[in-house]
Amino acid sequence: MILSLSKKIIDEANEIIKKDLPVDIYYKNIEEAKKDPSLFKLAMEFPHEVKELRIVDIKGFDAQADGGCHVKSLKEIGKILFLEAVNKGRNNRRIYFTLEDHE
C-alpha cells in the first residue's frame, strides 16, 4: 500500500508540474501574514524576531511562507522519479525520489 500510494503522489505531482504554473515570490508583514492561516500549513514556528515573511505562491495551486530556494515556474523541476517508500512508524512515511532533467 505504501508503494502504490507513494507512486500515486508522485504521479499527481508530475501532473501539476506539467501545467508549468508560474511561481511568484513576495513579502508580507508577519502580522498581516498571520491573518491567513493557509500560508502556514507546513511551517512549525517562526522566530519571534521575524518581522517580514517571504511568501512563495504557485499561482492557482498553493501559497506558503517559505525561506528556501524556489523555481520561477514548475517546468524547471523536470520530472519526479520515484525511488523508494519506507515505513517510518504508524503515521510516518518517507518517500525517496530524484529529479529527471527537463528539456
Image (tube, helix red, strand yellow):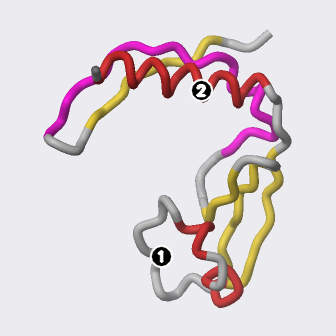
Residue 80 in picture, x, y percent from top left: 57, 19
Closer to viewer: mark 2 or mark 1: 2
On screen, residue 102 above or below 13 = above
Q: Is residue 83 left or right of residue 77?
A: left
Q: Mark 1: give few (<14), some (14-19) or many (20+) Cα within 10 Å.
A: few
Badge 1 amino acid: Phe
Which image quadrant is residue 52 in? Answer: bottom right
Residue 74 is a magenta residue: yes
The answer to which of marks 2 and 1 sits earlier in the sequence is 2
Q: Nearer the viewer, residue 7 or 79?
A: 7
Q: Which mark is residue 12?
A: 2
Q: Nearer the viewer, residue 71 or 6?
A: 6
Quarter the C terminus occupies: top right
Check disc 1 and report its element: helix, strand or loop. loop
Q: Mark 2: give few (<14), some (14-19) or many (20+) Cα within 10 Å.
A: few
Badge 2 amino acid: Glu
Q: Which mark is residue 94?
A: none
Which image quadrant is residue 1 in? Answer: top left
Q: Report the magenta residues as a range.
A: 70-89
Q: Residue drawn at (22%, 44%), measured in percent from left and top?
A: 91
Check disc 2 and report its element: helix, strand or loop. helix
Q: Is residue 33 left or right of residue 99?
A: right
On screen, residue 35 above or below 91 = below
Q: Residue drawn at (30%, 32%), measured in percent from left and top?
A: 94
Among all residues in the image, which is located at the extreme left? 89
Q: CA distance from mark 2 to mark 1?
A: 30 Å
Residue 19 in picture, x, y percent from top left: 81, 28
Q: Is residue 38 left or right of residue 3?
A: right
Q: Which mark is residue 46?
A: 1
Residue contact between numbered discs 2 and 1, judged by CB atoms under 8 Å? no
Q: Residue drawn at (69%, 52%), measured in percent from left and top?
A: 62
